Image: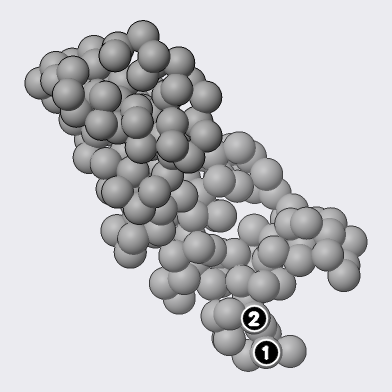
Amino acid sequence: KAAEQGDVDAQFNLGECFEHGSGVEKDEGQAVEWYRKAAEQGDAVAQCNLGVCCENGEGVEKNKVEAVEWYRKAAEQGDVDAQFNLGECFEHGSGVEKDEGQAVEWYRKAAEQGNAVAQYNLGRYFECGLGVQKDKAKAVEWYRKASEQGQTDAHAALHDLV
């Protein structure tokens, strides 16, 4: 009832329930509908979740351009998952033109919030000079942060560099 009356938290929670089949029958279409309502009211996590649905075609027709739009809205509000996802979109040219500089920018934001895979990716970018000046010390720094969180690829990369 609260969701139908426009309560953004209730809308988001209902989206989660439908996405995971928690207390209701799993229904990706209903999940998208409720995430969209919350996202349009500015809920960053709903925006990120809606982006994932759009990117993967879950409950909605696959639309990578729309996914990027939702990721950007959430990322600009500081949502770490959206920042990481946006970094991946720019790295792979998914829904946007490939842009290593933008990938670095969004991975850095996610990495600074503790996302271990973003930290590993930044290490890789600094090691190889992708979108940034090649910098072994910075590569080691980011690999170390990721490795300390148990990111195994970073641990192996760190072992190879040091």
SS type, badge 1: loop
Indicate the position of residue 162 as horizontal and vertical percent values.
Answer: 29, 14
Quarter of the N terminus within the rendering: bottom right
Q: Residue 141 or 76: which is nearer the viewer?
A: 141
Tell whether label 1 touches label 2 (CB within 8 Å). Answer: yes
In the rendered view, does 8 fall on the left or right side of 60?
left
Report the disc number at residue 46.
none
Q: Residue at x 25, y 31 (%)?
A: 141
Q: Residue 94 or 133: which is nearer the viewer?
A: 133
Whether residue 112 is visible, yes or no, is: yes
Which quadrant of the view contains residue 99?
Answer: top left
Q: Which residue is drawn at 56% across and 55% down?
A: 49
Indicate the position of residue 65 as horizontal and vertical percent values.
Answer: 42, 40
Indicate the position of residue 10 as horizontal and vertical percent values.
Answer: 64, 81
Separation (CA) of disc 2 from disc 1: 6 Å
Indicate the position of residue 148 as horizontal and vertical percent values.
Answer: 44, 37
Amino acid bearing label 2: Ala
Amino acid bearing label 1: Ala
In the rendered view, does 26 fall on the left or right side of 6?
right
Query: On screen, 91 above or below 43?
Result: above
Query: On screen, 30 above or below 131?
Result: below
Query: On screen, 5 above or below 31?
Result: below
Look at mark 2 in the image and give the residue it sits on: 10
Circle 2 residues within 10 Å: few <14, some 14–19, many ≥20: some
Report the disc number at residue 2.
1
Q: Which residue is drawn at 36% across and 37% down?
A: 145
